[in-house]
Image (tube, rainbow, N blue to C red):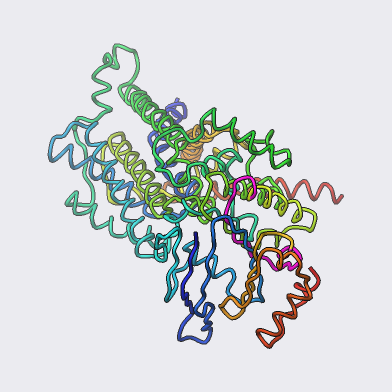
């Protein structure tokens, strides 16, 4: 029973974190920009959402929008540092990330903000449904299902939006910029603007994910973004490995969502088997390494077979 | 059409690597000129094209295109007047994007790009027809990624993209240098065909003196950041490679010949 519950929990976590992976995909893969500000933006989204709900009594859904806008601003800063001040890509992201740590502390006024008894989208969603007892399930199970539902709705909406956007003229320019800047400039496009646009969208999504996660886990913490990049990349890479070569963009995006869910499932299984939570990050690194090396190992096996 | 006045450019000033590449360069192009540019290494040919394209800005001097001063206009802003084909076949197309998406990018050169759809059905028709002209079988591979094409095919595609929105000036920077002789020949023929059919004004830098003589209506020779020889029309047609070598030696008083030049 325990493991089944853990799996449901994993799926719901996978869905709320999936948008983070989508955001990371935009910068790391589409724009070919190693954006480290992701960790700061994630916590920024969580902090903004938490503070607006707890201190100012905002509607939870509106706080998610505010969190997204805050993330977009963070993305703009990274873009500005890189395109106008000519600071190298990785460094620009790191500078934003470090700055955001202090900013997030300032926003919350403390290292974390609990959402005790706070109305969140999850609680609103639960309120629309009959009581858990009536449905014959535990309250925590209902909580998980509602979280899953909300995560799914948001993720699918974002995937739809991204699929549309990267098919538009501007979206194509962003994709081309990540592939061959020289050619893009020769076709009359301001590549600085395209990079900034990509960073803005990506960090907006990452902050959105942070807000979702905060509302689902019941608190926001300055450190909640630590390791977010690796988790995002893990989701992308696991999705890639499973789907091999998705023929179109929509499938690619869905593979990232599935990858995020599977990543969480692997973690859940491993924790059930007794892994120390302290070792979680190391485990994640190992999983990503394995996933990344599968293509190379496959090739190796084929060559060895040909030799013998 | 194009007027370059007194262009000066020094790279890495005040360092050990200081090199004055352009030394008071002057050049005027009329509408419809197809000019081939030859010169030794370091003569300033590519730098001149880069000045026109906006990759670098000059230290001194003016670049006028149809009377408009574009000397300090950012590269992407000038792009609407220019078509460019680079020496590196990989540089002119986006390898991760489909052939039709590359063409769609070129089709929108000079236009504001908004949230309209990246490619329309009518466009795909247009691209199929345009690609037929290349005679490389690309018209049936619109959805193939550009990275799958050979160097020659990519250059041909880049050429098509450069001419898609009739540019005021076509800049060709040794665009066949990285191709094998047979493919280079094919691309050059395509170049001439496209220039002729669209009545384009073009500047073609080349290391191949035979090609420089054979193609275009005008030939200029550069040395030490200046134009030292300018010939057009009938006189140009009658030129031999040896004439060019002699001309260079007499004007510059130095060695022009390196193996690449004589052998090609």
In the image: residue B88, left or right of residue A220: right
| Number of numbered discs overlaid on the protein picture | 0
Residue B262 visible in the shown view: yes
Query: Could you say which quadrant of the image residue A117 lies in?
Result: top left
Viewer-proximal residue among A202 and A191: A191
Magenta-drawn segment: B196-213
Position of residue A40 measured from the top left corner of the image (x, y, whole percent): 32, 52
Q: Residue furthest right?
A: A308
Q: The N terminus of chain A is located in which quarter?
A: top left
Q: Relative to residue B141, is residue B229 depicted above or below?
A: below
Query: Could you say which quadrant of the image residue A131 lies in?
Result: top left
Residue at coordinates 59% horizontally, 33% vertically from top-left? Answer: B126
Position of residue B170 measured from the top left corner of the image (x, y, whole percent): 57, 55
Viewer-proximal residue among B188 and B153: B188
Q: Relative to residue A270, is residue B39 depicted above or below?
A: below
Viewer-proximal residue among B67 and A192: B67
Q: Residue furthest top?
A: A134
Position of residue B264 measured from the top left corner of the image (x, y, whole percent): 79, 68
Residue at coordinates 48% horizontally, 80% vertically from top-left? Answer: B12
Q: Is residue B197 magenta?
A: yes
Q: Is residue A261 magenta?
A: no
Q: Residue furthest left?
A: A56
In the image: residue B71, left or right of residue B258: left
Residue at coordinates 45% horizontally, 44% vertically from top-left? Answer: A26
Residue A97 visible in the shown view: no
Q: Residue furthest front?
A: B234
């Amino acid at each position: 029973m325990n493991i089944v519950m853990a799996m449901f929990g994993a799926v719901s976590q996978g869905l709320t974190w999936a948008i983070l992976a989508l955001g990371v995909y935009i910068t790391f893969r589409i724009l070919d920009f190693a954006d480290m500000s992701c960790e700061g933006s994630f916590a920024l989204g969580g902090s903004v959402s938490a503070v607006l709900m707890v201190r100012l009594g905002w509607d939870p859904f509106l706080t998610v929008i505010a969190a997204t806008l805050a993330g977009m601003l963070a993305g703009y800063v990274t873009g500005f540092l890189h395109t106008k001040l000519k600071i190298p890509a990785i460094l620009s992201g790191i500078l934003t990330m470090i700055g955001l740590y202090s900013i997030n502390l300032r926003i919350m006024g403390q290292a974390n903000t609990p959402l005790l008894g706070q109305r969140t989208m999850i609680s609103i969603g639960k309120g629309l449904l009959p009581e858990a007892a009536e449905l014959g399930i535990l309250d925590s199970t209902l909580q998980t299902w509602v979280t899953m539902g909300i995560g799914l709705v948001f993720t699918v909406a974002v995937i739809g939006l991204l699929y549309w956007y990267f098919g538009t003229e501007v979206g194509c320019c962003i994709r081309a910029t990540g592939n061959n800047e020289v050619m893009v400039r020769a076709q009359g496009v301001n590549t600085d603007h395209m990079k900034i646009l990509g960073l803005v969208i990506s960090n907006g999504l990452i902050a959105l994910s942070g807000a979702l996660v905060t509302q689902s886990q019941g608190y926001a913490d300055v450190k909640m973004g630590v390791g977010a990049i690796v988790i995002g990349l893990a989701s992308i890479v696991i999705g890639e490995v499973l789907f091999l070569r998705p023929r179109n963009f929509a499938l690619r995006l869905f593979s990232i969502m599935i990858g995020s869910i599977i990543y969480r499932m692997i973690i859940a299984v491993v924790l059930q088997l007794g892994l120390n939570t302290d070792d979680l990050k190391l485990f994640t690194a190992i999983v990503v390494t394995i996933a990344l090396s599968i293509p190379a190992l496959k090739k190796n096996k084929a060559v060895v077979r040909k030799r013998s | 059409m194009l007027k370059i006045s007194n262009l000066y450019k020094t790279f890495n000033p005040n360092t050990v690597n200081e090199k004055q590449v352009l030394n008071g360069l002057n050049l005027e192009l009329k509408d419809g000129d197809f000019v081939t540019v030859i010169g030794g290494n370091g003569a300033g040919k590519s730098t001149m094209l880069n000045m026109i394209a906006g990759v670098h800005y000059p230290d001194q001097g003016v670049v006028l295109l149809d009377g408009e001063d574009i000397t300090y206009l950012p590269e992407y802003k000038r792009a609407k007047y220019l078509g460019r084909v680079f020496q590196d076949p990989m540089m002119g197309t986006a390898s991760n994007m489909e052939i039709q998406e590359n063409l769609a990018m070129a089709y929108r050169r000079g236009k504001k790009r908004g949230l309209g759809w990246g490619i329309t059905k009518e466009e795909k028709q247009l691209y199929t027809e345009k690609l037929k002209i290349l005679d490389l079988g690309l018209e049936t591979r619109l959805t193939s990624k550009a990275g799958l094409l050979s160097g020659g095919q990519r250059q041909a595609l880049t050429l098509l993209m450069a001419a898609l929105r009739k540019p005021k000036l076509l800049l060709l920077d040794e665009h066949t240098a990285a191709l094998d002789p047979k493919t280079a020949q094919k691309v050059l023929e395509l170049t001439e065909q496209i220039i002729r059919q669209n009545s384009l004004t073009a500047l073609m830098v080349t290391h191949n003196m035979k090609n420089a003589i054979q193609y275009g209506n005008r030939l200029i020779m550069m040395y030490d950041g200046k134009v030292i020889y300018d010939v057009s029309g009938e006189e140009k047609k009658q030129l031999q490679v040896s004439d060019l070598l002699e001309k260079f030696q007499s004007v510059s008083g130095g060695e022009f010949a390196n193996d690449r030049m004589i052998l090609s």
